[in-house]
Image (cartoon, rainbow, N blue to C red):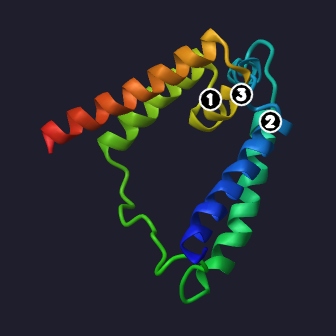
Amino acid sequence: MMAALPWIAALLAGTLFGLGLSVAQMIDPAKVINFLDLFGTWDPSLALVMFGGLVVNAIMTPLILKRKRPILAEHFRLPTKIEIDARLIIGGIIFGIGWGLAGYCPGPIITSISFINMDILTVLLAFIVGTAATRWVLSKVS
């Protein structure tokens, strides 16, 4: 049972995240498109959801990192790379274009699977193919 605790915690955290996306209507591509339409039907609600997440993270992260180690792991796994490089900028641009075109980012698309329609399946397939292609290209380059 102890070995399953990290998996159960991840499942619960993912479920809570998905529920939050659903309640905030962030799984609706129209919400995302309207957020990005600054000079048309702009909807600032996505910014409010992101701001809420940032506030909770800003408060909780320092409190969590005061612990000697995580509750369900041997050590904290924190990013070591802190510089902004071309790869990060290009990846951000590609992500933004895909997000703007599809109206979905990875969290909401996975949450939206429960609605199963061709749009969602197409975006999910494109997400998987894009991720696999990127991993393949990066393995050849580095």
Q: Closer to the observer: label 3 or label 2?
A: 3
Badge 1 crowding class, 10 Å Cα cut-off, few under 14, some 14 to 19, many 20 or more, is: many
Indicate which disc residue 8 carries. Answer: none
Tag 3's secondary structure? helix
Q: Which amino acid type is shown beneath numbered disc 2? A: Ser
Distance CA(mark 3)–CA(mark 2): 11 Å
Q: Indicate which disc, 2 or 1, sits on the residue closer to the N terminus.
A: 2
The percent coordinates of residue 126 (x first, y second) are 45, 20
The residue that label 2 is drawn on is 22
The residue that label 1 is drawn on is 109
Q: Where, by quadrant of the figure, is residue 133 drawn?
A: top left
The residue that label 3 is drawn on is 114
Q: Which amino acid type is shown beneath numbered disc 1? A: Ile
The residue furthest right is 23
* Rendered-image quadrant of the N terminus: bottom right
Give the camera-side residue of 20 and 3.
Answer: 3
Residue 75's place in the image compared with 20, above or below, is below
Could you tell me if the residues under marks 3 and 2 are in contact, i.e. CB atoms within 8 Å? Answer: no
